[in-house]
Image (cartoon, grey):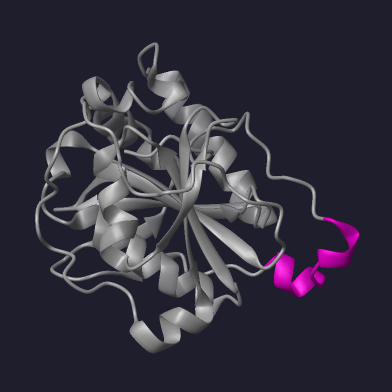
Amino acid sequence: MEANATHNPSIQPPAEPAHQRKSAAQRNARPPPELPIDDGLVLRRWSPSDAAALHSAASSSLDELARWMPWAADGYGREQAQGFLEFTAQAWDSASQLDYALVVDGQPSGSFGLMRARSGRADALEVGYWLATRATGRGMATRAVAVLTRTAFAMGAELVQIRHDALNVKSAAVPRRLGFTCVGVSEEEGGVVLWQMEARSELHRGVGLEASEPVEGSAGGSVELCTEYSVPEL
């Protein structure tokens, strides 16, 4: 899944330019701690008691996660899981990053979150996500991101963005299915693809359609999405 700031407490959101700063109420807006999806799937705020389940989901998926997630490159121990849970509790309280466990059949099976966009736009939120290998291929990531996208717009965001490695075709399938626009590929960021959706386009089209089909392709291919290979300033 996508390599991004979600699940990485060492990456801090960018400072907001003075002319783009929102009010304290807007900056500290929080979504509900639980977001139902469908068919028993639910996004819920991570709990301190989730350390064992988080460790199980991540450590059993290292063959996939280590390709894209720096925090998984050297394995994933129980201490890392506990550290993330402590970080995400603090980040939720400050509204700088809002992380959810995707619960499948009663078990946390991935992490999905909203954070301040690295583009620096104060009216934008970024979605980050990873899914345990045992839960892939059933459209769960797409449905979860659809719910988070709608939630971001309900919180007042004018723009929702998604980033992923250009070789990560599984992560690319999610924004493509949901109708995000591929803006370009940033070579300066090591070949990171940027997708975005504006609130006004979401109001007309909606998100979350045709989200249950399995992902095709493998991580070995490239994502031939954009004709532009540099991301413009946003």
Asked which quadrant contains residue 18, the reply is: bottom right
For residue 33, above or below residue 67: below
Magenta-tinted stretch: 17-28
**Residue at (79, 70) in percent of width and height:** 22
Q: Position of residue 23 (x, y in %)?
A: 81, 72
Tell which residue pokes out farthest to the top in this image. 74
In terms of depth relative to the viewer, which is nearer, 31 or 161?
A: 161
**Residue at (34, 49) in percent of width and height:** 225
Tell which residue pokes out farthest to the bottom in this image. 204
Q: Position of residue 171 (x, y in %)?
A: 31, 44
**Residue at (35, 60) in percent of width and height:** 145
In magenta segment, residue 27:
yes
| Position of residue 14 in the picture relative to residue 85 (left or right) | right
In magenta segment, residue 162:
no
Q: How many marks?
A: 0
**Residue at (56, 68) in percent of width and height:** 159
Q: Quadrant of the N terminus?
A: top left
Asked which quadrant contains residue 69, the reply is: top left
| Position of residue 146 in the picture relative to residue 87 (left or right) | left
In terms of depth relative to the viewer, which is nearer, 46 or 210?
A: 210
Camera sees residue 26: yes
For residue 200, above or below residue 168: below
For residue 16, above or below residue 146: above
Tell which residue pokes out farthest to the front in this image. 227
Q: Quadrant of the C terminus?
A: bottom right
Camera sees residue 42: no
Q: Position of residue 185 (x, y in %)?
A: 48, 42
| Position of residue 188 in the picture relative to residue 144 (left or right) | right
In terms of depth relative to the viewer, which is nearer, 180 or 55?
A: 180
